[in-house]
Image: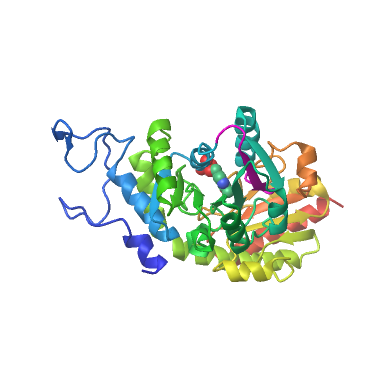
Amino acid sequence: MKPETQAIHAGQPSDPVTGAVTIPIYQTSTYEQEAIGKPRAGYEYSRTGNPTRVALENALAALEGACHGLAFSSGVAASEAVIRLLKPGDEIIAGDDLYGGTYRLFEKVWRPWGLSIRYVDAADPAAFAAAISPRSRLLWVETPTNPLLKIVDLAALGRLARDKHLWLAVDNTFASPYLQRPLEFGAHLVIHSTTKYLGGHSDVIGGAVLTSDPALFEALRYLQNAAGAVPAPWDCWLVLRGLKTLPLRMRAHGENALALAQYLESHPAVARVYYSGLSSHPQHSLARRQMRNYGGMISAELKGGFPAVESFVGNLRLFKLAESLGGVESLVCYPPRMTHASLPAEERRHRGIGDGLVRLSVGIEHVDDLRLDLERALEAARRNSG
Ligand SMILES: *Cc1c(COP(=O)(O)O)cnc(C)c1O
């Protein structure tokens, strides 16, 4: 099945009792058993399993081309479950441009516990190869990266992981499975914050891990139940509902973002635009090979630093100032003080996150309205930064 069909049907048969075409919200903590040791349909307790959650897990697995899916209560909880597969002394080689919360989890939770984490240029597969040591277990990347929207060569890292017997985990939140399916490039684990494009409506927090490796699946399923970071049935249902329009939405996000990135690149108040759909992006051809379109996220460095950013953000009307991304509505954020505030200032500068950097999550409103909104705010930024 094609993704448009999977998003609507995979894992979501009509309800066997009533024929309801939409999966019900099984709002129950427990299930009556036929006899001791004889649950009716395999369900005993909703931390361990719930039919609404199973529908979501199967739908997400189908979309990623995975054999197995596991839903979690947040994207961070999904990441946490994957990292728990490691032991003290093990090492992660991670791309250097990461979701701020993942960086915080690595540095403040897992490093003190005994993991070592090395960061390398996400855009350079040779840097990953050079960093591998006998303690390395896991390669961890996002692509496109956050907030600088570098593209990671998934095929190259898939080969490296196979040759060196490491796991490759890909946080596919920014692309969604409609734009790229990392397992096809050799990844072992795909991680999602379903809060973003999969849910798509900024109304739910959730996460997921997808894999086709039976041993990894068993270990993660054990952790899902034993550590217990499971999503509520209602939250699973919201993500399932959002998922049905994922392909339509991703096409609209990508079209709007490409048009706005081209507009921004031509604007005199903008110093630099980061968007892999632009031919000026150093990895444009890799993005074209690896992704169906270039997604809905744009970062741009404004001339005039923070004062310019302040008047830009203050003069936007449609783009709302908020954390998060991937919803139908357009958002703007200032990574240095918002999503990436947990990075020390020096680390931010080292990574190229400038004081004039803004990140746009381009929604699916009409592109003309979005362009006008940017135009007005950029004029204000230019006036106020002299
Ligand atoms: C938001 C996000 C996360 C964390 O997900 P939550 O649902 O907020 O816990 C992880 N990775 C990326 C790329 C994200 O954007």
Q: Which residue is drawn at 51% across and 49% down?
A: 191
Which colour scheme appears in the figure? rainbow
How many numbered marks are there?
A: 0
Q: Which residue is drawn at 56% across and 57% down?
A: 162
Q: From the image, which quarter does the N terminus lie in?
A: bottom left
Specify whether 343 is left or right of 233.
right
Q: For residue 370, what is the image quadrant?
A: bottom right
User: Which sits in the foreground, 249 or 353?
Assistant: 353
Question: Whole-percent x and y of residue 267?
Answer: 77, 65
Question: Whole-percent x and y of residue 90?
Answer: 61, 37
Q: Which residue lies furthest to the top in this view?
A: 112
Q: Magenta stretch: residue 196 in it? A: no
User: Which sits in the foreground, 358 or 275?
Assistant: 275
Q: Residue at x 44, y 52 (%)?
A: 211
Please indicate, yes or no, whether residue 312 appears anywhere in the rendered image.
no
Question: Whole-percent x and y of residue 293?
Answer: 57, 68
The image quadrant where one finds ligand 1 is top right
Q: What stretch is highlighted in magenta?
A: 87-99
Question: Whole-percent x and y of residue 333?
Answer: 65, 47
User: Which sits in the foreground, 218 or 311?
Assistant: 218
Q: Residue furthest left?
A: 34
Please determine whether, in this image, residue 148 is positioned above or below residue 82: below
User: Which sits in the foreground, 136 or 376?
Assistant: 136
Q: Residue at x 65, y 46 (%)?
A: 93
Specify whether 93 is left or right of 302.
left
Q: Which residue lies furthest to the right in this view?
A: 386
Q: Give the prevailing secondary structure in the magenta stretch.
A: loop
Please indicate, yes or no, whether residue 62 appears anywhere in the rendered image.
yes
Please determine whether, in this image, residue 331 is positioned above or below residue 235: below
Please determine whether, in this image, residue 339 is positioned above or below residue 126: above
